Image: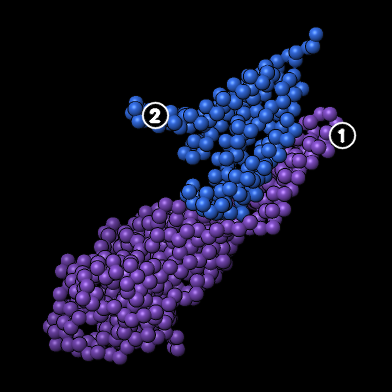
């Protein structure tokens, strides 16, 4: 998909503008300061599994997906860094490795799915959304009903890890490297 | 090899230069010391091989004091400087290039002196140490005393920081070292009490300090004692011969110390006496909302550039080649460049909120304690050069999460304009109201104080509205321009003046 980066940059700029709109900002409890940029970083992490569209097809397409994911990471990072004018801290710089890990894992899983067809790419997307979004909910349910903690799952969910300042990169790197190796190692189908 | 040995010897010489003699370095007040205040510390430096000057640092949590010292070719030198009595304190010595040469953690005084109306903590200066111990004894019923030679009188009030009173016993009219007059004036302007037995000649003339108030003559146990009010503090003078002829000389001295310490009353006031120990509770109003950041033209330009790049690079790339990855790499490189430029945008400055209590009294002398709350992205430490004419002293306080806080004491400040009439605190009542009701009304904007002043007012009343404490409270215009904070957004929250009132004995 040629315009993945454009979609990411446009979406992030639109979210940045939306958060700056006073009624939205006040309802979210944010201000035009560091919290504005932090909201944008969370949006960047969430947009990766939602908006990245891998090209379906052979190994060459998988390689193009890798380049496209890198461009998306760059475009998202540029927009987040643009909002540094509102921030006193270097949070945008500090979260670039996390963002890179997310993009590596997301593009790897989606590209591996895309090697098998659009259905598998969609299943990969659902898997990513569950892995990134559900651990915090699961933790809450376990606390509420099981009186047990599931906070070890922060390493699976980047947004939760960022919110709790407990970031670990190894699950993202492991998922990214394994899926990319598989996506690039699978032989291309030959037409009959 | 011939060159190497002298080089090694030279290197060893450099490394061993300027060492601290930890055995002989000590607090001059030892074994006494007041936790949370600065006490005089004698630092002994040895092996000053060839160093013309160096810098001595007194580091406490959040505050770093430094003093440049000229060694003038000496091999050994003693430096007296204020050091915080507390944890995590270090003393460092650095050379002219700023390289650290030595550091130690000073041994703290073993006996910690709490502020107590019954026992003022006094520094006693005398040429006759035996007579000083008889006249001002260190006893549980009178005072806690540290004894010094008259010749080592400190010329910087910051060395007197922990003391409630100074006693100068000088029957021979010996000349005090230069700087003593300013040190006494600054110390008294901060609420200190100086008792002079005999007389003294100052080591300097034409010192620009406010004159004390007109003298009062008090008769203490049959001995005439002159009292000169000096802002919130006072200077007492008693003739040496008058004291010698009295049968109760030691009691006269203690009563003279208590006269100021007890605000002229015959009994000790309730609560704890005022001292420069950092307060446990701090007078901070809720923080103001942060200033909204506004995007600059650079932001709009770079944002448009990112969108154009992400749109045009794939379109142009498709005309040049069938492969998409070169265009994506161009987008990546372009976005990295934009990101690099984006971080050069002007950032919002960290916020510093200032709250100030001015202490006045008799005469024109006054002092200021400023409570400074700074966002933690601002400097973690306040640096003070002890050689500067501006003799401020800072100490760290407990702050809110994400903020650092300090109390900064500044002696001899000019009295600023007032914003309203004074309110009188008498017997825990302000006017006809209990002090808490008055504070509540101040929070609602029902007094002449602003609602920002109300937090400071309430804090001061909670700390001080005890039996025997009478004072006048006045809302102030901000006492001085907040300069020296070019790297922060300074907000002046509130300022009040407190004037202690004496009770008839």
| Mark 2, residue position | A141
Location of residue A167 with respect to B47 vertically, above or below: above
Q: Which chain is blue?
A: A
Q: Colour of chain B?
A: purple
Viewer-proximal residue among B160 and B344: B344
In the rendered view, does B39 fall on the left or right side of A15?
A: left
What subunit carries mark 1? B
Q: Residue A67: where, in percent of width, then height?
A: 73, 31
Q: Report the quarter where the C terminus of chain B lies.
A: bottom left
Of helix, strand and loop, which one carries label 2? Answer: helix
Q: Which of B389 and A132 is in front in this view?
A: A132
> Is residue B409 among what the camera can see?
no
Residue under the point 69% across and 53% down: B300
Which residue is farthest left?
Answer: B247
Which residue is denoted by mark 1 in the rendering? Answer: B320
The mark tally for this picture is 2
Residue at x 26%, y 65% (from the top left corner) = B462
Residue found at x 50% / y 36%: A161
Left or right of B235, for residue A118: right
Q: Is residue B243 left or right of residue B83?
A: left
* Res B108 quadrant in image: bottom left
């Amino acid at each position: 998909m040629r315009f993945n980066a454009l979609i990411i940059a446009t979406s992030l700029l639109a979210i940045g503008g939306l958060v700056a709109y006073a009624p939205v900002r006040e309802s979210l409890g944010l201000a035009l300061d560091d919290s504005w940029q932090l909201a944008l970083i969370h949006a960047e992490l969430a947009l990766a599994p939602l908006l990245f569209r891998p090209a379906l097809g052979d190994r060459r397409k998988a390689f193009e997906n890798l380049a496209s994911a890198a461009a998306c990471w760059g475009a998202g990072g540029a927009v987040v860094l643009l909002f540094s004018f509102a921030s006193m801290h270097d949070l945008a710089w500090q979260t670039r490795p996390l963002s890179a890990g997310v993009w590596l894992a997301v593009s790897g899983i989606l590209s591996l799915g895309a090697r098998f067809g659009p259905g598998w790419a969609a299943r990969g997307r659902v898997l990513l959304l569950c892995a990134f979004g559900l651990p915090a909910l699961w933790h809450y349910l376990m606390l509420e009903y099981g009186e047990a903690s599931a906070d070890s799952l922060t390493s699976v969910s980047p947004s939760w890890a960022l919110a709790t300042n407990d970031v670990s990169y190894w699950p993202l790197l492991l998922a990214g490297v394994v899926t990319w190796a598989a996506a690039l190692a699978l032989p291309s189908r030959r037409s009959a | 090899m011939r060159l190497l040995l002298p080089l090694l010897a030279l290197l060893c010489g450099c490394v061993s230069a300027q060492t601290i003699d930890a055995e002989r370095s000590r607090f001059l007040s030892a074994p006494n010391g007041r936790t949370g205040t600065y006490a005089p510390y004698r630092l002994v430096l040895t092996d000053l091989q060839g160093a013309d000057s160096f810098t001595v640092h007194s580091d406490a949590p959040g505050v770093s004091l430094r003093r440049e010292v000229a060694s003038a070719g000496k091999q050994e030198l003693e430096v007296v400087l204020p050091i915080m009595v507390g944890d995590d304190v270090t003393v460092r010595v650095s050379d002219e290039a700023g390289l650290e040469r030595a550091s130690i953690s000073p041994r703290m005084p073993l006996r910690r002196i709490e502020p107590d109306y019954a026992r003022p903590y006094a520094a006693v200066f005398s040429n006759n140490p035996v007579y000083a111990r008889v006249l001002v004894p260190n006893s549980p019923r009178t005072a806690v005393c540290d004894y010094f030679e008259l010749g080592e009188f400190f010329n910087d009030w910051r060395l007197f920081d922990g003391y409630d009173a100074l006693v100068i016993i000088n029957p021979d009219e010996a000349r005090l070292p230069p700087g003593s007059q300013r040190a006494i004036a600054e110390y008294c302007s901060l609420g200190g009490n100086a008792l002079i037995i005999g007389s003294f000649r100052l080591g300097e003339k034409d010192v620009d300090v406010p004159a004390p108030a007109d003298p009062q003559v008090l008769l203490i146990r049959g001995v005439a004692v002159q009292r000169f009010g000096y802002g919130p503090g006072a200077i007492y003078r008693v003739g040496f011969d008058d004291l010698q002829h009295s049968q109760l000389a030691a009691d006269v001295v203690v009563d003279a110390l208590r006269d100021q310490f007890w605000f002229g009353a015959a009994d000790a006031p309730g609560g704890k006496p005022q001292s420069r120990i950092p307060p446990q509770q701090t007078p901070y109003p809720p923080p103001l909302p942060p200033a909204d950041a506004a995007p600059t033209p650079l932001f709009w330009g770079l944002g448009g550039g990112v969108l154009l790049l992400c749109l045009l690079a794939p379109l142009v790339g498709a005309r040049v080649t069938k492969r998409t990855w070169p265009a994506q790499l161009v987008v990546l490189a372009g976005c990295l460049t934009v990101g690099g430029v984006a971080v050069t945008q002007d950032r919002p400055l960290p916020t510093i909120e200032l709250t100030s209590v001015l202490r006045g009294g008799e005469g024109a002398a006054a002092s200021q304690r400023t409570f400074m709350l700074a966002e933690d992205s601002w400097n973690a430490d306040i640096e003070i050069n002890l050689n500067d004419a501006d003799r401020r002293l800072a100490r760290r306080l407990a702050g809110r999460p994400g903020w650092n806080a300090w109390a900064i004491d500044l002696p001899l400040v000019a009295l600023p304009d007032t914003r309203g009439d004074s309110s009188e605190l008498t017997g825990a009542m302000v006017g006809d109201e209990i002090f808490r009701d008055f504070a509540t009304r101040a929070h609602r904007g029902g007094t002449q104080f602003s609602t920002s002043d109300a937090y400071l007012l309430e804090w001061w009343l909670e700390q001080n509205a005890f039996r025997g404490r009478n004072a006048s409270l006045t809302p102030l215009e901000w006492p001085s321009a907040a300069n020296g904070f070019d790297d922060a957004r300074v907000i002046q929250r509130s300022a009040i003046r407190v004037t202690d009132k004496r009770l008839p004995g």
